[in-house]
Every structure is written in structure tokens, then in C-alpha cells.
Image: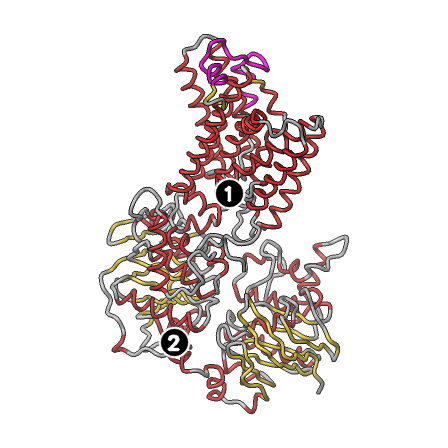
Amino acid sequence: MEQRGQGWTQERIVFALAVVLFIVAALGLRGFADPNNLIAIVRSVSVLGILALGMAVVIIGRGIDLSQVSVMAMSGAWYLQMLNDGRPEGMALLTVLAFVVFIGLANGFLVAYGDVPPIFATLASGAVVYGLVRSQFIGSETVPLPPGHWLEALGRMRLVTVPVEVFLFAGASLLIFLFLRYTTWGRYTYLMGDNFQAARTIGIPVRPMNLLRYVISALLAFAAGLLTASNLFSINTRVITSTLLYDIILVVVIGGIGLSGGKGGVRNVVGGALLIGIMLNAMTILDISNIYQNLIKAIILLAAIIIDSLMNPRDEQTAQQGDI
Amino acid sequence: MTAIIDMRKVTKAYRGVAAVKAVDFTLEQGEIHALLGENGAGKSTLTKIMAGVVEATSGEMLHRGQPARFLTPNEALNAGIAMVFQETSLVPSMTVAQNIYLGEEKFLNRLRGVYIAAQQFLQSLNFNVDPAAPVASLGAAKRQMVEIARAVHHKADVIIFDEPTATLTPEEKRHFFALMKRLQASGVSIIFITHALEEALGHADRITILRDGELVATGKASEFDRAKVVQAMVGRALTQQIYRKRNAAHLRKRGAKVLSVQDISMGNMVRNNSFSIYDGQITGVFGLIGSGRTETFKIISGVYKRDFVRGGDIELDGRPVRYNVPRQAIKDRIAYVTEDRKSEGLFENLSIAENFFSGLVAAGLQESSIVSLREMRSLSEQWSERLKVRAINSRAKAVELSGGNQQKVVIGKGLVQRPRLVIFDEPTRGVDVGAIAEIHQLINDLADEGLAVVVISSYLPEIMNLSDRILVFRQGRVVEEFSPVNATEEKIMYAAVH
């Protein structure tokens, strides 16, 4: 039996891979090692990283949130739509926040009290969110940011030449790190991910914890939506049909957070996000077209999931029927 | 006579600990061979190797003189070796007939034909079981009959029975032994594992006794008597000390009534069950599988919910309680230590320290609202020492520990919650002899400190040794209460079966 802290853990392999990839790209690709490009790499994974933090909180406690991208795009789009319609800022923000929290609660409720497997509950709720907001609240597929809004300023903001979203990703990582590591609810998350029945028997409030995790995921999705708007000055709801959702899961799994729950933490998300960022950037510099990038990402995701299920086999006895 | 199975220097080790050590065992053609030994002596493991359920770590096995190595139970079955398990291996949602013919259905499967064939077959065995009944609806004894019928049906010429009579009534037992004789007459060789010495002495041709994974005696049944068997089985002084008999002077007096249970019911498993639990003593609970003992205490600790209508009453210190989740019971300082540590006890991938700490944070008893690693470490050191958990360090994962140490961690997880009522469900299942003594000592200490303690066990010597009073469960309720002074194993078993 290997002791912890020795040998090739998945985390170290990912870190080593990222370093190797970084060195190869820096030596072999013109313009890769340029400081501006390096900043661009981190910037490019900020939104993805924030989404992956939310996904990680859900997966560590045993579950999955497939409604994330839908919540991100539709909450952001609705918010912008209300601003465009001339609603006051505070009201728009509060309305959308309440909506997002409600989606998180609904996901958690379906999983905790309805015993619906998370993968189906969130798949369906994501579709409902899209359909509801698209048909009732927003007028077109793409909703622009009203000129002069604070998100525009945020998107242009630089701190010591570094775009502010890098700091926002870092800040979100710190918050989730503190949550998982230093709060009792963070401990509960790991315990219920490792053995749900044992966690329940020992007196952990497993059902409220389920609600909390999906609410955190939904709130982070909303934050990612606002950040997207500040970058692109609009929100295109077609992002829902993109590969973003698979990218999120790729970041989480490749970072070493087992899909069976109870393992990993924020550093795995950061590691996974950086590895994916370096890889995508290198592929872009190499001028590999988008369709091939998607194929490559998909193959890596498939490989990562296979390796994950070999390294963290799902335990027949402690797994609940139908989870993930 | 010729040997049909000949095992030579067979060893099976789990995680480096040998369950069976270099055992030589022969089964002769057409004999009835009894395999005796205490819990954890390696009887089940040895026979599981023959039946292809587990693979031997070393050693070889000859089947009809040919070297044989069965990787799956199916391979063994095809070679004519069938095993009837202690824990039933039937499919509960299927009917009796479907279970008997499981795995050999024709491509076009006519249920009617299967039922008629099963009916005739069961009658030929003298088993009174309805072939159309779903297995889930049967009691333990009838399930056992279906298991036996299935093995016989497969025309096996070696049949291994793992504690076949534990759940049978005396009448059913007579039928069973008559069947065994008939099978023998038709040329089948039989191994049966048992706790009951009289059965072995009365019905076997030969007897083999295992102790701590080693073969200590083997020979013709006529060469053994009860004293000789007991001496071979028990052997060491330690074992005698663990399971010594209590006398009246050592019984603890009951303290205040902690828990009063009136007529609680849950579906078919728990029916109008009533009893009380007192401070400062150990209440032993005995019952066979399916007697509702675990279910009853899971209701008390909030894991299960009793029936909403006519579910009965539970009073804790005279205050009526109804728990929807275990958390409420934990807040009322009731701890349930599970019988199934793998699926509902341990956090296997987390460290020993994190396991101990989980009990504390779950009960909200930690010193500060910010999780402190220092507190976790000191808690773990304190409890590892108190419970004598042996591990390389407290960062070792729980899954890497031996069964005994895992059990201690599960117990510790409950005790850090400072309970006043502790329910131990099978506290020494799958635990080595040394750890059993330590766990028993701990349970006794808890009662001496004044806690109300419940010990559920299906091992009679454990019940007899630990309990200050004994409750016997049958068909979902307490049917009899004994004092360990005037109870005998026979009396308790009789109450549990009839």
C-alpha cells in the first residue's frame, strides 16, 4: 500500500504534464512564452475555471451539475435584458440572483428529496431554464450589454497590466478553498462524497448539504455569466450548444477529482484549468482548426474518464443506485 | 475410498493476513464431512476456495486426482462442486422456481413448465415451498431450502453447505439431515460447516476442526467426543477468557430507564415491538437473520422511520420522540454503530484522523466553527490510543487497516459524539481474536461508566458473555427476556426459532 504523499498521484502527473507541455510550447512555439500570451492563457481559462470550481463542489460531494452552462448563459442574458429594458440595476440583480438560487435549490431538492439521479435532474432542469428564459424573458439569442454599464468597465480593468478576471478566478478559488477546507460544511461535503450512507448515519445533514452544493454551483455559474458579459459585451445563449459543459468536466476530471466523489480540491481545479489553458493556447498558435480542437479535447476527456474509473473505481456497496 | 478433493498446503491471505494457513484437507468419495471451528477460524474461506468463490494465495488443489483451479463459482459448478451459502445468494425479486432454474433457462422460457417441474422437484426433496412465491416473501428457513434445492438440482457431486441448519427449526433440521443421507446414498460427497457440535458428531462420517486458519484435528467422527472437539476448537486460553460464562455476582444492576419502546412497527420487518433499555448495563439482543433486530434499532437511531400510522411510541427519558433522520438521534445522544462497516460505517478513502473527526463535526461538538487540523490530530491521537488502533500513522487511509482496526475506528467515530445510549450491531463481525477482547473490554467499560449499552449479535457466546440481560427477537419483536445466569445457548436458540 502506498502512503500518501509518495509516488505518482494523478495530481502530480497533471502538474508534470502541464510543466512539460509548457516547456515544449515555450521552446517550440513562437510567441507562446510572451508575457502577454501567458496572461491570455490564464484569462482564457478564468470563466472555465470558475465554472469548474462550482462543478468540483458538486462532484466532491457525489453528484454532477449539467445545468451549469444553461444557468450561466440564461441568468446572464436575462440580467442584461432587464437592464436593456430600463429596469433599475438593483432590482435586476436581485431578481436574477433569486432566480439562480431557486434553480440551485430546485436541483438540490430533486436530488435530495426526490431521489432523482443528479445527472438526469440537472440535465432536465438545464433544459427547463433555457426554455423558460428564452421564451419568457429575453427577445433574441444574443443580448448586448448596455453601453456604459459597470461590467464594461470591469472587462477593461487591468491591475498591474493583468486583466481583472484573473484576480476574480483567484478570488473564487480562495473562497472555495476556504469553504472546503475550513468550514464544517466543507468537511461534510467530503464525508458524503466518500460514503453517503455513513455520512447520514453519523448525523450529517445530507439533504440540506445537497441543496447548498447545487446553490453554490448555480451562483458560480451566474458569476461566470457576468464575467463573460464583461469580456464580450454581450451574452450569446448559443453557448449552451457549445462544448463548454464538456470542457468543465474535463478540467475537473483531468485535475484529479474523481467522479465517484470524496476526493480532490481547489488545487486540482486550478491545475486542470491551467493544463487545458496551455493546451488550447498551443493548439491555437499551431493553427489547429476549431473542429479538430474539439475532437482532441473530446478524446482527452474520454481518456481522462477511463483513467478516472480505473483509478477511482465506483464502489458497488457504497454507491447509491443511480448516482451520477 | 478415493479422494474427490485433495487440498495441499492451501493458504489464503487477505491484505497480508492469512485467513487459511497451509491447510491439507481431503474429501473422500461419498462421505459426509463436518467442518468445525469458531467464528473467523477460516471454515468459510477454505470451502470458498473449493467452490471457486475466492482464489488461494498458494498451495494446490486436486479434483478427482487432477490439479484444478476454479476462477469462478461457475467453473466449479460445471466441475460438479456446488456451494450453498450462509448469506443467501438468491435473487429476491424472482420466484422460487425461477431461482432454481436460474442460468439454465431455455431460449423460449415457458413459466408454466418451469413451475410444474419445480413443484415436482421440490416435492421429491420433501420441501414444502410454493414454487410461484417470490423469494423476497420467504422466511430465512425457506430461503435456505431453495438454496439447497438449487444445489441439488445442478446435479453436483460435491455439495458444500455453509451453516445450513442455523436458520432451520428442529423439524426442518430432521428433514435436512434425512436429505443429506439420501444425497450421500446417491453418491454425492458433502461438506457441511456448523457451529453445533452435536450435528457434526451425530451426522458426519468424518470431522475436521480449524482454528485461526490452521487445521488442528481431522479424523473419523467416531474418534471424537464433545470434550475433544471443544478442546480442539477453543485451544487457547485467550478464547476461553473472551467467552467465559457470567455469574450472578458480576451482573450490573439496571439504572434509570432511558428508552421505552411501545408497540413499534415498520412494514413486515418490525411488528408491535415493545421493550425498555436501562442506564449502566449491557442489553444483549439476539435474533436470527430476518428477526427485525437491526431494523428495530435503526428505527430507534433514526436511520429508518417507523410506520406513520400505528407505528407505536418511543420515549427517551419519558419524552416521546420520532426521528426522521439520524441527525436528530445524534443530537439526543444516541449512537448506532453499524454491522456493515464497509457500506455505512467507514469513510474508506479518508484518513483515520478524518474518520474520528467526522463524528465530532457531524455532532457539532468541535471546539471552533473553523475546522482545525490541530484539533483533528489531537482527537485522533487520543482515540487511537484509547481504542488501541494499530496503524503506521493517523494519516493512513481507513481502507488500509485490518478488520479489527477498522471496527475500532467505526466505534470511535460514534463515541466521540459523547452518546448516552450506544447501540453496537455485531461489534466483532470480521474482527480478529485479539481485537475482539479489546472491543469487549471497551463495551464493558462503557457500561461501567453508566452508559446505556445495547449489543446486537448473532454469536451466542458473545451475547452470553457481555449481556446483563438478554432480549431475544423473532419475527419482528422481542419474544423473550433472559438473565444470562439462568440462560443457556439452547434456551436462547429455541426462543429465537420457535
Question: Where is A246 relative to A317, above or below?
Answer: above
Crowd around label 2: few <14 · some 14–19 · many ≥20 (10 Å)? some
Question: Where is A249 relative to A154, above or below?
Answer: below
When asked about the image quadrant of residue B409, the answer is bottom left
Residue at 40% from the left image edge and 38% from the top image edge: A178
Name the spot of residue B299 as percent of width and height, x first: 39, 53
- Report the chain holding disc 2: B
Identify the element where label 2 is drawn.
helix
Left or right placement of residue B277 versus residue B394 in this view:
left
List the residue tagged with mark 1: A62
Name the spot of residue B327 as percent of width and height, x first: 36, 47
Q: Which residue range is magenta in the image?
A: A130-157
- Report the chain holding disc 1: A
Q: Is residue A146 magenta?
A: yes
Residue type for callout 2: Ile
Residue B435, label in figure: none
Residue at 50% from the left image edge and 46% from the top image edge: A263
* Quadrant holding the C terminus of chain B: bottom left
Left or right placement of residue A73 versus residue B121 in this view:
left
Residue type for callout 1: Arg
Tell me the distance, in whole angstroms, between the alpha carbons under discs 2 and 1. Answer: 42 Å
List the residue tagged with mark 2: B242
Q: How is the image coloured?
A: secondary structure
Identify the element where label 1 is drawn.
loop
